[in-house]
């Protein structure tokens, strides 16, 4: 029911006709998400960290590891707050592991299935090493990365239509660490002044639409509550509150 409602809202929001493609199975999707090397992931992290000047553009916190590097070199350290950072993929990668208790392949595959079922995005552009590009990544504080992956907030291009890399920050559930301006503006150069791609507006538009669909349908909070029960107990809740049908739909092909 939730999936049907979400699909209906999606079609009303950004699509005029349903996809003609057959809905992919979990195994089909997982097979298409090719793992990438740690070296590729590390290179991407360095690129987006430099583009974002080592700050999370959402919370405005500065990278704690970078702070230590600057301190060791006797260089000036930017102001607080300081946090641990990660590379957040807009189209998720297997190496984006939000929770050590979950299967990263499963989490990525479920999100890919939403992109494939509800959008016209060509995911073949993002298999293998092609997923690790600055256009598909944002430097984020760890908790914010998880929030982004679970569609708890989105970046609204319509707030600044004339500025290609500026977005309004739209929060769909409570999260205390967002920057006060509620504006995110991406650079197009690294900290050395060299050109670098900003996040792709089309990918962020699709992420935003999915976030709104899940929020309107109530699916985001419901799915998160079911996964919390599973994570807390490791199995069905002893109180009998677990939605077994939904849990199976999340965990099984």
Image (tube, rainbow, N blue to C red):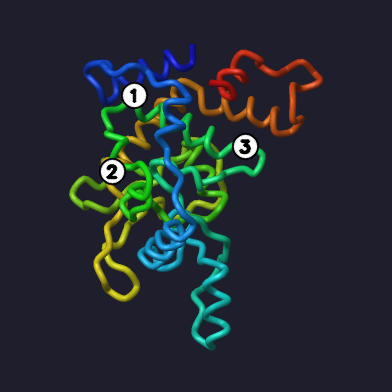
Residue positioned 54% across, 88% down in the render: 74
Q: Pick whichever, 212 or 53, lies toward us.
A: 53
Other residues around mark 3 within 10 Å, as few (<14) / some (14–19) / many (≥20): some
Instruction: Residue under label 3, please give it.
Output: 102
Query: Residue tagged by mark 2?
Result: 157
Identified at 37% across, 50% down, the residue is: 129
Labels 1 and 3: the sequence-earlier one: 3
Residue 245, quarter of picture: top right
Label of residue 118 in the image: 1
Q: Is residue 179 visible?
A: no
Q: Nearer the viewer, residue 169 or 44?
A: 44
Single out the residue that lies furthest toward the top.
1
**Do the residues under discs 1 and 3 have CB atoms within 8 angstroms?**
no
Task: Please report the residue visible at 45 percent of the width from the left and 17 percent of the height from the top.
Answer: 3
Residue 220 at x, y percent in the picture: 52, 28
Q: Secondary structure at mark 3?
A: loop
Residue 180: % across, % down: 46, 55
Q: How many marks?
A: 3
Task: Label 1: state its secondary structure.
Answer: helix
- Element under disc 2: helix
In the rendered image, residue 104, in percent from the top left (x then y), is placed at 55, 39
| For residue 3, above or below residue 227 | above
Label 2 to label 1: alpha-carbon separation: 20 Å
């Amino acid at each position: 029911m939730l999936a049907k409602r979400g699909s209906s809202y999606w079609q009303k929001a950004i699509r005029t006709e349903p996809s003609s493609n057959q809905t992919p199975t979990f195994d089909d999707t997982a097979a298409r998400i090719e793992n990438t090397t740690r070296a590729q992931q590390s290179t991407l992290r360095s690129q987006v960290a430099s583009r974002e000047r080592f700050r999370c553009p959402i919370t405005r916190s500065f990278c704690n590891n970078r702070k230590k590097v600057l301190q060791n070199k006797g260089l000036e350290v930017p102001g607080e707050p300081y946090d641990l950072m990660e590379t957040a993929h807009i189209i998720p990668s297997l190496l984006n592991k939000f929770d050590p208790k979950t299967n990263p392949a499963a989490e990525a595959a479920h999100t890919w299935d939403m992109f494939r079922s509800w959008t016209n995005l060509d995911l073949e552009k993002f298999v293998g090493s092609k997923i690790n590009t600055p256009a598909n990544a944002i430097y984020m504080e760890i908790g914010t990365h998880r929030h982004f992956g679970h569609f708890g907030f989105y970046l609204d291009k319509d707030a600044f239509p004339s500025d290609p890399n500026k977005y309004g920050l739209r929060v769909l559930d409570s999260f205390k660490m967002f920057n006060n301006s509620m504006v995110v503006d991406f650079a197009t150069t690294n900290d050395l002044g060299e050109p670098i791609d900003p996040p792709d507006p089309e990918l962020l538009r699709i992420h935003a639409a999915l976030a709104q669909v899940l929020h309107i349908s109530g699916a985001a909070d419901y799915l998160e509550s079911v996964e919390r029960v599973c994570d807390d107990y490791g199995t069905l809740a002893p109180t009998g509150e677990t939605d077994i049908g939904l849990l199976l739909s999340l965990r099984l092909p």
